[in-house]
Amino acid sequence: MSHAFANIAFTAAVREAQARDGSRAQYVRAFEADRNTRNAELLTRH
């Protein structure tokens, strides 16, 4: 699924707020991580 909306929705101010509130890492993993990295993570989960 494309996450192109994340480029629009997650402005610099939003990313700063996410970092301040401690949720930035989850959003990076969900919307900004490389597709191959996500697929590799799925394959290595037990």
Image (spheres, rainbow, N blue to C red):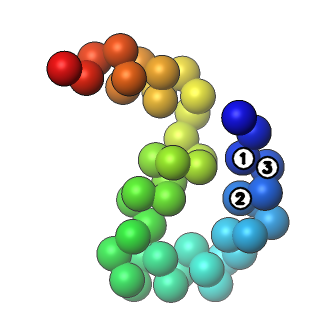
Q: What residue type is disc 2 on? A: Ala
Taking 40 as reference, is 20 above or below it?
Answer: below
Residue at the image point whose x is 50% and y is 54% from the top: 28
Residue 29 position, x and y percent, is: 46, 47
Relative to 6, 34 lies left or right: left
Q: Could you tell me which secondary element the residue under label 3 belongs to?
A: loop
Residue 19 position, x and y percent, is: 42, 76
Relative to 13, 22 lies left or right: left
Determine contact: label 2, label 1, CB under 8 Å: yes
Residues packed near mark 2 inside 10 Å, few (<14), some (14 to 19) or many (20 plus): some
Relative to 40, 36 lies left or right: right
Residues packed near mark 3 inside 10 Å, few (<14), some (14 to 19) or many (20 plus): few
Q: Could you tell me which secondary element the residue under label 2 belongs to?
A: helix
Q: What residue type is disc 1 on? A: His
Residue at the image point whose x is 37% and y is 83% from the top: 21
Residue at the image point whose x is 53% and y is 41% from the top: 33
Q: What residue type is disc 3 on? A: Ala
Determine contact: label 1, label 3, CB under 8 Å: yes
For residue 3, which numbered disc appears in the image? 1
Determine contact: label 2, label 3, CB under 8 Å: yes
Residue at the image point whose x is 50% and y is 84% from the top: 17
Along the line of sight, which residue is nearer the eye, 45 or 20?
45
Residue 41 position, x and y percent, is: 36, 25
Q: CA distance from mark 1 to mark 3?
A: 4 Å
From the image, tell me which residue sits under label 3.
Answer: 4
From the image, tell me which residue sits under label 2.
Answer: 6
Q: Could you tell me which secondary element the residue under label 1 belongs to?
A: loop
